[in-house]
Image: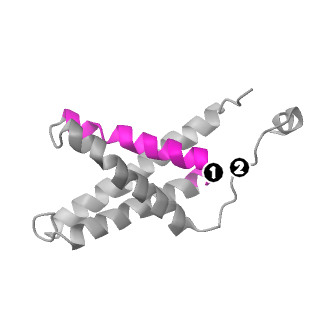
């Protein structure tokens, strides 16, 4: 029987998605304020945006307190759906939103690499004894 995440885990995931997105958003505002746009520098801007996103993911994972594969995937899916706002405000097309999944997956992976081995993954809950100890 699959284990359902507790409300605390959902809150941690939501907090992680908000922090990762917020750090990337603020970095984008800073880039714009200093005159760094995709049109101005087509090499440096994507690289810095990627690194800022990865830093946001690393901070989010630190706040979530885990680096398990399920949490990484959930964080990536949460960021992907949060980026859907860009479609609603007309900043990107639906096709561009689907294409952004590769960038988001790479950003989440790089964020995990930046975090290193400082957090252990959550233990697998495969028995009733593990469930009672939580």
Residue 8 lies, in percent from the top left, at 63, 37
Can you say whether 64 is above or below 110 in the image? Answer: above
Q: Position of residue 11 (x, y in %)?
A: 56, 37
Please report the residue visible at 37 percent of the width from the left and 67 percent of the height from the top: 51
Question: In the structure shown, which secondary structural element does the residue marked by tag 2 occupy?
Answer: loop
Q: How many marks?
A: 2
Would you say the residues marked 2 and 1 are in contact, meaning their CB atoms lie under 8 Å apart? yes
In the visual, does 32 lie left or right of 83? left
Residue farthest top in this picture: 1
Residue most extreme to the right: 129
Q: Which residue is mark 1?
A: 68
Image quarter (top left, top right, bottom left or bottom right) of the C terminus: top right
Name the main secondary structure of what is drawn in magenta: helix
Alpha carbon distance from label 2 to label 1: 6 Å
- State the image quarter where residue 92 is shown: top left
Label 2: few (<14), some (14–19) or many (≥20) C-alpha neighbours in 10 Å: few
Residue that label 2 marks: 122
Q: Secondary structure at mark 1?
A: loop
Compared across the picture, whether 34 is left or right of 21 comes to left
Q: What segment is highlighted magenta in the picture?
A: 63-88
Task: State which quarter of the image contains the N terminus.
Answer: top right
State the image coordinates of residue 87 (x, y, percent, origin top left): 21, 36
């Amino acid at each position: 029987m699959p284990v359902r995440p507790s409300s605390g885990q959902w809150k941690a995931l939501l907090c992680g998605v908000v922090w990762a997105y917020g750090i990337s958003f603020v970095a984008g505002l800073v880039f714009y304020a200093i005159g760094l746009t995709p049109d101005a520098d087509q090499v440096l801007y994507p690289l810095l945006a990627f690194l800022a996103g990865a830093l946001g993911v690393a901070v989010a994972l630190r706040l979530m307190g885990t680096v398990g594969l399920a949490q990484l995937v959930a964080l990536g899916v949460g960021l992907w759906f949060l980026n859907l706002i860009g479609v609603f405000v007309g900043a990107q097309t639906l096709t561009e939103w689907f294409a952004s999944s590769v960038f988001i997956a790479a950003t989440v992976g790089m964020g995990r690499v930046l975090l290193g081995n400082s957090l252990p993954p959550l233990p697998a809950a495969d028995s009733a004894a593990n469930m009672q100890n939580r």
